[in-house]
Amino acid sequence: MQVYVDGHFVPAEEARISVFDHGFLYGDGVFEGIRVYDGNIFRLQQHSQRLYNSAQCILLTIPLSPEDMQAAIVETVSRRELPNQYVRVVVSRGAGDLGLNPHLCRRPSVVIIADTIALYPAHLYTQGLELVTVATRRTPAWALDPRIKSLNYLNNILAKLEAQQAGALEAVMLNGEGYVAECTADNIFFVRQGQLYTPSTAAGALQGVTRDSVLEVAQELGLSTAEGFFTRYDLYTADECFITGTGAEIVPVVRIDGRTIGTGHPGPMTTQLRQGFEQLCRHSGVRVSPHVTCAALA
Ligand code: PMP
């Protein structure tokens, strides 16, 4: 397995960045997680856009044009030679000194890893997952906009630890006002009387690529959708609930804080949306041939 590091492909075990990199020292950087299905890179354009938007917000100039970045991702995926992959793209501030000053970091580091991932055990996709609400609140948008997908995940990690201590695999995170924001690395949806709801990004949710795709699939299926501000009451009394993310994909949720959701089994709309999403993943995206080579790369 080869990893892309600053324009070069190196064997995974030899891939290195500096201990002075501010991505390591301070979590100063941005990243994306991208899926490849049957040799098609899913929503490459949207992931690339979000990466560049995140970088723009933190005054980080990615040392590649978006076209060269996409070419580098395609090349990394084609070298991995697996039909289904999970790709991690990381752009960190680069090596500086031990102080915070980003201006002392001369060149951002770019790393692309094409591997696989399984975030949840397979049986949960058919039986459903249990969530718990945790005390750790989502960082408010006025402190750090949740649309910035930064390398600093401590807020989410603290919530994940709390969920695990309570015996659950994933947490419901509320914002400072008590509205449901999202989970630690996933967006959350619920269904009530045939309508699909998800917290608005203004409530503290990342604008997930999977979230957008699910909303699209729902609209194609003729379901009505709404984004807004919801409390735990809305989750507890929902007919169905599920979470979405690139790594997790779509996971049905059947219990939240000890309350059984709907019938306690994955609901029909969740199943329908999962099927529609699977179709979308298999039949769209940027096709990667294992023979692609990219002139822009060293
Ligand atoms: N929320 C957070 C905090 C995330 O880190 C992620 C990505 N893992 C998501 C939601 C889901 O986003 P996407 O569908 O783009 O992967």
Image (cartoon, rainbow, N blue to C red):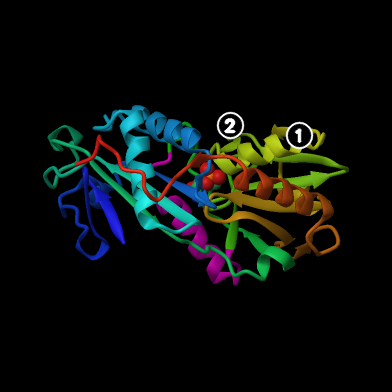
The residue closer to the viewer here, 43 or 39, is: 39
Does ligand 1 reach within 8 Å of label 2's beta carbon? no
Q: Is residue 271 above or below residue 100?
A: below
Q: Is residue 123 left or right of residue 78?
A: right
The location of residue 184, given as percent across then percent down, is: 53, 53
Q: Is residue 105 visible?
A: yes
Say which residue label 1 marks.
220
| Residue at figure coordinates x 60%, y 36% from the top left | 203
- Read off the magenta span: 149-169
Q: Disc 1 on helix, strand or loop?
A: helix
The residue closer to the viewer here, 114 or 100, is: 114
Q: Which mark is residue 6?
A: none
Q: Is residue 47 magenta?
A: no
Q: Amino acid at mark 2?
A: Ala
| Residue at figure coordinates x 55%, y 36% from the top left | 207
Q: Is residue 128 visible?
A: no
Q: Is residue 221 above or below residue 79?
A: above
The location of residue 119, given as percent across then percent down, is: 53, 63
Q: Is residue 183 left or right of residue 113?
A: right
Quadrant position of residue 11: bottom left
Say which residue label 2 marks.
202
